[in-house]
């Protein structure tokens, strides 16, 4: 008995084959959902289902109001376990342009979760930082970070449009970074995160959670950075 391949899988293979063959080039806009629905004689919901999986794999980018595009070459970062280097430093070392677009920097009461991470009482005042990280003119990530009031109160807004948080803490505020904790997970974007990263609603995203501590173990900053699904993180451990 013959079994027919589901249409959404046929559509995914059509796009994958087009990308492999070069018929669909990097950054090129793919046929629209209505076009593909007519081509495959199916519904837009089936096309959307196919695109959702391709976006999760990092092969395409879905942009609200613009359409679906072939993802550009892999973007990412390498994690050096022997040094406190930032992704921004890696970008600059490659000769790429980097800028920050400050969305928010303001006092607010700490939630239970943020208070736990900063080791303070819930409701205690913290500074919330939100900014876009833009590389070569493209929005690469959105940072959402929290600083204790005694540290955040000393930060100047102009620093936040030009410097990494490591640079601000160490060079501007004179604090010593003794430890950086990172964890990475896959998640689904909120409406706000999706809009900031120019993704479709509820798109997959990569989330890096982090905490920066001083020599006494005190948290200097905690937060998360959200990346589009094609972003990758590699870690290299050198043998002694």
Image (cartoon, rainbow, N blue to C red):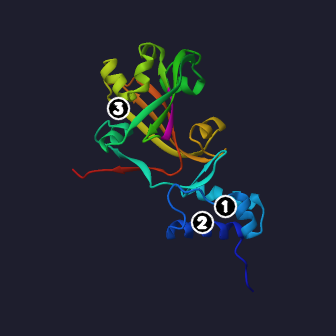
Residue at disc 3, secondary structure: strand
Taking depth in this image into account, of 71 and 35 the one nearest to the observer is 35
Q: CA distance from mark 2 to mark 3?
A: 44 Å
Instruction: Give, as a single range, the part of the protein colored magenta.
Output: 138-145
Task: Report whether residue 237 is seen.
Answer: yes
Task: Report whether residue 175 is seen.
Answer: no
Q: Which class describes the residues within 10 Å of circle 3: few (<14), some (14-19), or many (20+)?
A: some
Q: Are marks 1 and 2 in contact (CB under 8 Å)?
A: yes
Of the two numbered discs 1 and 2 on the same chain, state the one appearing first in sequence: 2
Q: Which class describes the residues within 10 Å of circle 2: few (<14), some (14-19), or many (20+)?
A: many
Q: Is residue 93 magenta?
A: no
Q: Nearer the viewer, mark 1 or mark 2?
A: 2
Q: CA distance from mark 3 to mark 1?
A: 42 Å
Instruction: Judge left or right: residue 203 versus residue 207.
Output: right
The label number, if any, that marks residue 154 in the structure image: none
Q: Is residue 179 above or below residue 53?
A: above
Residue 44, percent across and down?
Answer: 75, 58
Taking depth in this image into account, of 115 and 135 the one nearest to the observer is 135
Residue at disc 2, secondary structure: helix
Instruction: Judge left or right: residue 203 versus residue 116.
Output: right
Q: Are marks 3 and 1 in contact (CB under 8 Å)?
A: no
Of the two numbered discs 2 and 3 on the same chain, state the one appearing first in sequence: 2
The label number, if any, that marks residue 179 in the structure image: 3
Of the two numbered discs 3 and 1 on the same chain, state the one appearing first in sequence: 1
Residue 209, percent across and down?
Answer: 49, 37
Residue 68, percent across and down?
Answer: 62, 54
Quarter of the image holding residue 172? top left
Q: Is residue 204 above or below residue 134?
A: below
In the rendered image, which residue does mark 1 sit on? 50
The label number, if any, that marks residue 15 in the structure image: 2
């Amino acid at each position: 008995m013959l079994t027919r391949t589901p249409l959404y899988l046929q559509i995914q293979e059509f796009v994958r084959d087009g990308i492999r063959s070069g018929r669909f080039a990097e950054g090129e806009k793919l046929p629209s959902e209505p076009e593909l629905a007519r081509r495959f004689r199916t519904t837009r919901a089936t096309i959307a289902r196919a695109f959702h999986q391709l976006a999760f794999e990092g092969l395409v980018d879905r942009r609200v109001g613009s359409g679906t595009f072939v993802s550009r070459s892999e973007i990412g970062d390498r994690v050096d376990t022997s040094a406190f280097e930032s992704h921004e430093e890696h970008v600059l070392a490659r000769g790429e342009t980097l800028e920050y677009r400050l969305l928010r920097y303001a006092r607010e009461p700490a939630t239970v979760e943020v208070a736990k991470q900063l080791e303070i009482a819930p409701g205690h005042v913290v500074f919330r930082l939100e900014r876009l990280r833009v590389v070569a003119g493209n929005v690469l990530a959105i940072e959402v970070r929290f600083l204790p009031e005694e540290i955040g109160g000393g930060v100047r807004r102009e620093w936040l449009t030009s410097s990494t948080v490591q640079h601000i803490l160490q060079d501007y505020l004179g604090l010593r970074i003794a430890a950086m904790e990172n964890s990475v997970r896959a998640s689904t974007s909120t409406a706000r995160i999706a809009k900031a990263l120019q993704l479709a609603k509820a798109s997959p995203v990569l989330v890096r959670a982090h905490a920066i501590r001083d020599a006494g173990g005190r948290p200097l900053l905690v937060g998360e950075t959200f990346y589009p699904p094609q972003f990758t993180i590699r870690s290299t451990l050198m043998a002694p």
